Image (tube, rainbow, N blue to C red):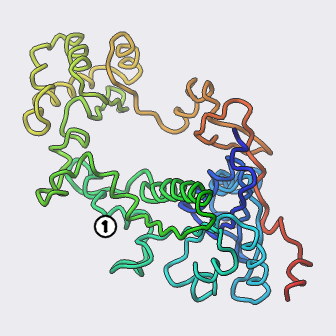
Amino acid sequence: MTNRLEGIRVVDLTQFLPGPAMTGMLADQGAEVIKVEPPAGDPVRAMAPFENGQSVWFANLNRGKRSVVLDLKAEAGKAVLRDLIEGADVFVESFRPGVMARLGFDYAAVRAINPRIVYCSISAFGQDGPLASHAAHDIAVEALSGFLSVNDGPDGTPVVPGVPAADMAAGLTALAAVLGALLGREKTGVGEYLDIAMFDAMLPWCAHIAGEALGGGASPRSATQRSLGGAAFYQVYTTADDRHVVLGGREPKFAKALLEALGRSDLLPLALGEAGPDQQILIDFLRSTFLTRTRDEWDAFMHQIDVAYAPVLDFTEAFAQPQIAHRHLLAKADGRHHIAPPFGQGKDWQPGPVPELGDALSDKDLQDHA
């Protein structure tokens, strides 16, 4: 299953997170990904922490790819890129709108070289519109798409998100679009242009919380949303050792099981009611109750009953779980640790080699195009 995309060649001009995450998933499934880097390399190569000489971030997103160093402001570099495009199935770039046109490699130019190519642009806000030229990374896109407003602390102030959701949403959306375009090409014989925006990719993720705002009504607030902090059984609680647990399911059977175990069945109607102020009595009860035992003591208690619950783990604890080992979600190769692709590839999966800068193209190749 790791070679399901064997025979697909990808020319990848992307850096940082959304694009490399997407092309990394293509590489993990057997595509030949040629990573085109400037002479200084992808900036992520220099980002700590490092393991066996490579950035952990870079290694996990770029394993199994080949690296080509090209100066796309020079004719020699452009000539090599044209050669790569001729034999490619997919072309991916993540520059700000207008850059590829100035370099001479916008979709029209690339299509003229290879009409079958699937050309994917990944940007913050897309190639057109009032925000197209606005500079932004993940947090700014989350802010402008409304998501940061519900990523707030107890006082309602937005906090820096722990997950780069806009980056990863764009990468996953681009992956789906590219694979769909490759399937479509089997019918039409020609490629197509894909304009993927982080902003656009985030919006579908709010359908479960922003229904009223979508219809022109009020925007959601965490304190009144069932999945954002307004419900007792979808909530984070502090334990006696200043650690945390979560209740993560509001189904009646879960609420009934826990409240009966705690001797407070009388509070069940509150658990089944509307999220928001009406649940505060129940939330206060659970807060005071969880403070009476340590996180691990609650963990042992909860395993005796049927409740949607979890201890809050840090990454070190999370990686050490038996579930990780059972599902073969971590692997080690060449002295480096890798998070395995989530495609159910099992114990036999091994990460591809991490490319050294420019390891796939010799100086002679460049000289031939000078």
- Left or right of residue 328: residue 144: left
- Left or right of residue 267: residue 45: right
Q: Residue at x 14, y 37 (%)?
A: 275
- Expressed as whole percent of the image width and height from the top left, the position of residue 169 reads 45, 55
User: In which quadrant of the rendered view does residue 108 lie?
Assistant: bottom right
Quarter of the N terminus within the rendering: top right
- Expressed as whole percent of the image width and height from the top left, the position of residue 170 reads 47, 59
Quarter of the C terminus within the rendering: bottom right
Q: Residue at x 54, y 55 (%)?
A: 180
SS for callout 1:
helix
Q: Residue at x 63, y 86 (%)?
A: 103
- Expressed as whole percent of the image width and height from the top left, the position of residue 14 reads 61, 68
Observer-nearest of 50 and 91: 91
- Left or right of residue 133: residue 327: right
Observer-nearest of 300 and 364: 364
Q: Residue at x 67, y 31 (%)?
A: 346
Instruction: Tell me the crowding category of disc 1: few under 14, some 14 to 19, or many 20 or more residues within 10 angstroms, Cα based.
Output: few
Vertical order, 266 against 272 (above or below): above
User: In which quadrant of the rendered view does residue 83 lie?
Assistant: bottom right
- Expressed as whole percent of the image width and height from the top left, the position of residue 302 reads 35, 16
Observer-nearest of 294 and 221: 221
Amino acid type, residue under disc 1 in the picture = Leu
Vertical order, 42 against 24 (above or below): below
Q: Exactly how many numbered labels are in the figure?
A: 1
- Residue denoted by label 1: 144
Observer-nearest of 301 and 210: 210
- Left or right of residue 133: residue 95: right
User: In which quadrant of the rendered view does residue 57 lie?
Assistant: bottom right
